[in-house]
Image (cartoon, helix red, strand yellow):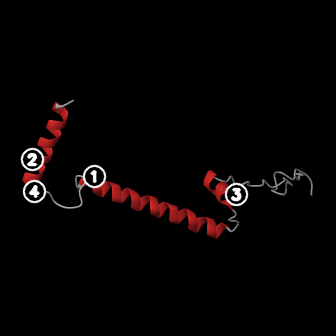
Amino acid sequence: MQGIDFEENNEASGLSMKTPEVHVEKSSFTIKLLEKVGVRDKASKNIILIGIAVICLGITIFIYARILNGGSSTQQTPEQIQARIKMMQETISHK
């Protein structure tokens, strides 16, 4: 057949031979710290990190609950609150 031209460029046909890119995973500080301690298994590292996160969440909830409750674990009567205020005022006035 005359007048038909074929492309000989391999890139146009999708057959180019490019080197595959290697994905290098960067480790966080905590992962590196666990490796230094001696934890090598990835699943164990994840479990330890989840445990740390749960502990931090529990501490945060505990602190937040104490702040909302006025720093006391029991309800105070109005007389107790007034006595505390009076004691604080006396402390401030003596300075």
Three-letter code, disc 3: Lys
Residue with the mark numbered 4? 77
Which residue is tagged 3? 36
The kind of residue on which mark 4 rests is Thr
The circle on residue 34 is none
Of badges 1 and 2, the one in the foreground is 2
User: Which quarter of the rendered picture does the N terminus lie within?
Assistant: bottom right
Q: Position of residue 84 (x, y in %)?
A: 15, 46
Counting residues from the start of the chain, the first of labels 1 and 2 encountered is 1
User: Which SS class for mark 1?
Assistant: helix
Which quadrant holds residue 90?
A: top left
Label 2 vs label 4: CA separation?
A: 9 Å
Earlier residue among tags 1 and 4: 1
**Residue on which the image places disc 1:** 67
Crowding at mark 2 (Cα within 10 Å: few <14, some 14-19, many 20+): few
As drawn, 94 above or below 36: above
Taking the image as shown, residue 38 lies to the left or right of residue 55, namely: right
Under mark 1, the amino acid is Ile
Instruction: Give coordinates of residue 75: x percent, y percent.
Output: 16, 60
Please report whichever mark, 2 or 4, sits nearer to the chain's N-terminal start. Answer: 4
